[in-house]
Amino acid sequence: MADQFCALTGAPPATAEYYIATFGSIDAAISGFFDSGGAPPPAVTVPAVEAAAAATEYVLARESELPACNDAGLAAAIAAAAEMLPPADAAQRLFADECAYSFDTPYNASGLYLNLATQVAVGPAYLARGGAGLYVLQRWRRVRSAAAEVAASEAVAKPAASWIEALEAQQKEEDAMEVVREASLVVVDAAGAPSAPVPFPYAGIPDTLYQRVMSTLELAKAGGTKVSILVFTVTLYANHAHNLTRSP
């Protein structure tokens, strides 16, 4: 439906998604678009972000104002890249928690870049392979919760009598750790060079982009889908095929 909307109105995919989601049918969406004078999707509101922050482990804005993107050129580049995103596809697989070409994860200090168009994540060294476009930079870190502090205190007060008890105490403490997840938006050029990260969400972010990123982050928080051994093996073969020789 989005393709039909775009063909008849000349609007970008993000606008098509907004009007179709708002009006429910393609005919009503097109009528609503022209009745509005071709208005773009509205910007996301602070209450919507606060509600989402309460339902996700990602660190989102909870203040009265969203952080601003002070670089007007970068904000325009993000908006332009967002307009180029293909319509969301519920059947598209998400590879969000590990780099497709290495073992980088969001826990790495440099984070993990998730291409919003392809739904495939790459480490910073592989951005050129990931392709140009709009990315979500995920950074995760473990912090000690109150329960983890209690577990650590118990381990000190009662030293383990065996290596099994030591492992159990360590696992108990790790299980009690909390994960802080932070996200930002990055535009990557054709050479694989990333822009400065912009905290997500920022003031003025289009609602359609906000919803797209939020749905992606929710899937990423749930674990996404790890790259299969087959995909990784094919990648390694492609990378090193030039070093192979054919046996006579």
Image (spheres, grey):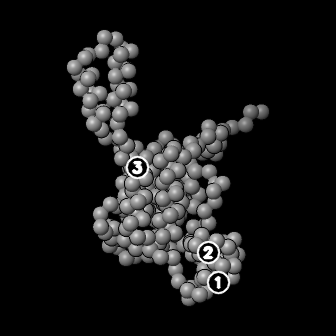
Q: Are marks 3 and 1 in contact (CB under 8 Å)?
A: no
Q: Which residue is mark 2?
A: 23
Q: Dot 3: within a 10 Å radius of its alpha carbon, few (fewer than 14), some, or many (20 or more) residues?
A: some
Q: Amino acid at mark 1?
A: Ser
**Structural distance between the alpha carbons of marks 3 and 1:** 38 Å
**In the image, is 119 to the left or to the right of 245?**
left
Q: Which residue is mark 1?
A: 31
**In the image, is 14 to the left or to the right of 66?**
right
Q: Is residue 124 above or below residue 1?
A: above
**Structural distance between the alpha carbons of marks 1 and 2:** 9 Å
Q: Residue at x 48, y 54 (%)?
A: 217
Residue 105, percent across and down? 45, 44
Q: Amino acid at mark 3?
A: Glu
Q: Dot 1: within a 10 Å radius of its alpha carbon, few (fewer than 14), some, or many (20 or more) residues?
A: some
Q: Dot 2: within a 10 Å radius of its alpha carbon, few (fewer than 14), some, or many (20 or more) residues?
A: some
Q: Residue at x 31, y 41 (%)?
A: 143
Q: Which residue is mark 3?
A: 57
Q: Residue at x 57, y 55 (%)?
A: 119
